[in-house]
Amino acid sequence: MKVRCVLICSAHLHKPCPAVYHPSQMMSSEVFVPGWLQQLLVVLLRFALFFAAPVNLTNGMECSARGPASYILVFTGHWSPQTFPKQYPLFRPPAQWSKLMAVTHNEQYRLWQEGAPASDGMKSFAEQGLTVDLVKDAKEARKRRVVGSMYRTAGIPSGIGHSSTELLLTPRTPLLSLIVKVIPSPDWFVGVDSLNLCEGGQWKQEVTFDLHPFDAGTDSGFTFSSPNFPTTPPENITMITSQKPNHPANSFYYPRLTELPPLATVMVKRQGHTPVRQQNRLSNHILPDTTKPNRFSETPLDCEVSMWSSWGLCLGPCSRGGLRHRTRYILLKPANSGTPCPEREEQEECTPHNCLAHQ
């Protein structure tokens, strides 16, 4: 009589599986395992480990594209006195853009995220334009295979201009994030958060979109040239709009507009060749002839004036009566066909103070 006992143990429990024993072998130090059972256990173990391993997903869909994809990224700044006339920085320093930092990654990494607090590295970049901490964090994430590559471009010394670089994306890291600091500003920047360039099994050919300013939530300054004023405690990253923050002192406050014009645009276009990998090197390619800056309509800027001063003394002869004056001054000059400034001086008739004693 033969006694057989077949058990399949779970790969997650890490317990040895008992073999098939014959009664005469129960006292032997050697265990006999048939070859067919060994093969079956190996197949089952591989099957269990396959489904237990994490799967790299992007927005709920796995990128099954065959091989990597090469792109050229073109950043175009549209920050001009015509589109953003309010408090436009002309000197010390003039309007300009920092170096661009881009990262390819999967959904387990975030360079920045609207509605979430800024990391220490993001705070350093948004306030000072420094990338040291962000690069360090991205390198650590690359060791975990959640970041592919990092790219940087040179800064743009004016509000209008271009910078560009070549990108290489893989099915493992098909997402793109980037940031550029607005200079000067307290902690403002423009950027892209986790743009998925892979749809199912296909790489997108071209993507173009507008960029609007964001507040990193680490500095409470209202204007481009505000002094350092840390936000305590720090707030979440939020988009700046034409009416948010709702304060006339804010440099992007345009109550007549439903939304701000684009501060910049980004174009990501697929190329036919694979670029030479330039890890962490500055890049600024010659732009294709078809890339031209978009022209936006001028943003009207209404005049802003102060409150009236107090009335001055009533002066004049008692026989004819006197006059008194009050004034106000211009806070913000109009631009681009905005509402002109109202009168800045006003007068009215009055009775001189020395005449009241004779009445």
Image (cartoon, rainbow, N blue to C red):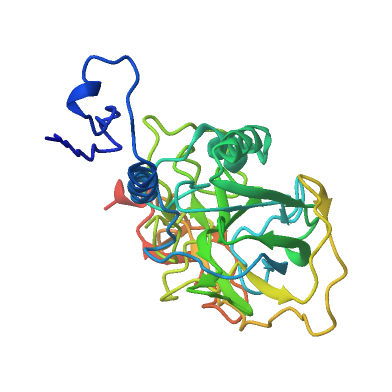
The residue shown at (53%, 45%) is 146
The residue shown at (43%, 48%) is 237
307 and 77: which is toward the camera? 77
Q: Position of residue 307 (x, y in %)?
A: 42, 56
Q: Is residue 284 above or below residue 202?
A: above
Is residue 316 at all visible to an observer of this figure?
no
How many numbered marks are there? Answer: 0
Q: Position of residue 219 (x, y in %)?
A: 49, 38
Q: Position of residue 245 (x, y in %)?
A: 40, 55
Is residue 182 at all visible to an observer of this figure?
yes
Q: Position of residue 302 (x, y in %)?
A: 52, 72
- In this view, the residue farthest toward the right is 286
294 and 229: which is toward the camera? 294
Write down the quadrant of residue 211 in the picture. bottom right
- In this view, the residue farthest toward the front is 1
266 and 189: which is toward the camera? 266
Q: Does residue 348 appear left or right of residue 229 in this picture? A: left
The residue shown at (32%, 24%) is 31
234 and 304: which is toward the camera? 234
Write down the quadrant of residue 335 in the picture. bottom right
**The N terminus: image quadrant:** top left
Q: Is residue 354 above or below residue 66?
A: above
Q: Is residue 30 above or below residue 128?
A: above
Q: Does residue 92 appear left or right of residue 19 in this picture? A: right
